Structures are given as structure tokens and as C-alpha cells.
Amino acid sequence: MRKFMKRFIAIMSIIVFGLCACSDGKAGANNSTKAPGGSAITVKKDGSIESWLTVEGFSTDYSEEGLKNLIDTSITAYQNQAGQAQVSLKSCKKDQQDKLGVEMTFGDWSSYAGWNNYFLDYMYASEMGMETGTIENSTDGFFAGTISDAYTAGFDLETTLTAASENSAKQSVTKADLLNMGESHIVVLARYGDDEPITVNCYNDILYVSDGVSVTGKKSATVDAMDGYGIIVFQ
């Protein structure tokens, strides 16, 4: 499987990429906060995803407008290939510390996963003057929805999770337990050892997390660098 949600380092080697938005532990379906250097996404009750990307090491060779145009054109190209995808760029602004903040919204988990997988290949093809119309449309590496839908989508859930809340019915749960919790919600996120930590803001209380996931609030947890999947189960 390709690395999912790698930083924008490919080609230019001048940008650090994180899917970023920060939580103070109080983020809910309609409330998330952002802070410099924090990496996170917000999973909303309607199934949509919000992300805040921070780009450091800004280069004079790659302007704010240039990055905005690159993202805009990649979104258009991706939506031409994946007609049902809902992806939009809300803002792209540089702050006084020369860090660029990019705010994006995605209609559902597959739009989020698909565009993030697509972007690196699009970026490489664009730099090399290659055709972008043949880039594979893949949603590997991320899922957000019910546990039963995650299993249907191909995640085997062969894992053991530990309790993250006083509302958790058990101290730990395995695959069999998870399948009996089919209508509870789950976030599955592929991570690699050189990836930035990402905070996931959920719209309800977190119940269980996998190894490598640190609970930072009732509705937020940070997935650290690892080789494998970070998993969060919430109500």
C-alpha cells in the first residue's frame, strides 16, 4: 500500500505536509479549533471531514498563490476522475511566521482518502509533465463511519483496543467485540514511522483506541507515528 497522507515533500523537498487542525479536547460536530504545528482532522456527524493543513519551510520558489493553484487544479482533476467526490478548498493563507494554512472540506471519508492519495501522484505527474488522467483512484489508508461499514469496506478489524473512557463497557475489546458494536463509529488511519502525528476530532465520546493512539480529550485523540493503523472507536 502506498504511504497515505505523506507530506508535500515529494518533488520540491521544501514543504512539510500535515493534515492539520487542532483540538482543545472540546471539539464536536460543529466546533474545532486550529493551532500552529498541530496536525488533525475533524470527523463530523454528517459524515463530512474537515482538515487544516499547515505548510512550513515556505519557499520563495513556491508562492502562496502557486500552492493554491496547484491544490485547485488537483481537486478539479480528481473530481473529473471520481465524479461523486466532494472536495473543496476553503482557504490558503500565509501567516506572519511564513507558515501556510490550508483549510479544506470533504463530503465523506472516501473523498478525503481518495484526494489525499491522488494528490502526491498528481503533483509528481504535473512536475514531470506527465499525463494525469491515468492516476489510480484509491481510497486505501483511511476510513470513518460505522464499524459494520468499515468491515464491509474490507478492514478486517483483527486488533485489540483499550478503553479510553469511563463509558467503555470493557477494559479491552477484540474483533468479535467490535463486530457486536456494529453501529458504533470508527476511524481507521494508516500511519508510517516518518509521518507527523495527527489529532482526530470526533463528534462523540471516544470509547476505545489502538496502540499508538493517545487520548487528548473526551472527543479527541492523537495518532502518533507508527507503522500500521491507528484506530479510534467512538459512540
Image: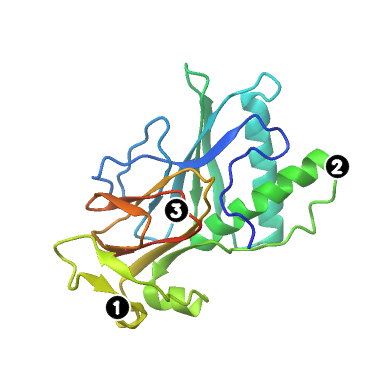
Name the residue that disc number 1 marks. Answer: 181
- Left or right: where does residue 175 sit relative to residue 205? right
Instruction: Looking at the image, tell me whether mark 2 or mark 1 is earlier in sequence order.
Output: 2
Of the 4 image quadrants, the one containing the C terminus is bottom left
Check disc 3 and report its element: helix, strand or loop: strand
Instruction: Looking at the image, tell me whether mark 1 or mark 3 is earlier in sequence order.
Output: 3
Check disc 1 and report its element: helix, strand or loop: loop
Residue drawn at 35 percent across, 54 percent down: 213
Look at label 1 and name its amino acid: Met
- Left or right: where does residue 182 sit relative to residue 78? left
Instruction: Looking at the image, tell me whether mark 2 or mark 3 is earlier in sequence order.
Output: 3
Q: Position of residue 9 (x, y in %)?
A: 64, 37
Look at label 3 and name its amino acid: Ile
Closer-to-camera residue (114/4): 4
Which residue appears farthest toward the left when viewing the image?
A: 166
Q: Position of residue 12 (x, y in %)?
A: 71, 33
The image's mark for residue 129 is 2
Residue drawn at 31 percent across, 42 percent down: 23
Image-quadrant location for residue 180? bottom left
In the rendered view, tell whether residue 92 sits above or below residue 171.
Answer: above
Dot 2 and dot 3 residues touching (CB under 8 Å):
no
Image-quadrant location for residue 230? bottom left
Of the 4 image quadrants, the one containing the N terminus is bottom right
Name the residue that disc number 3 marks. Answer: 49
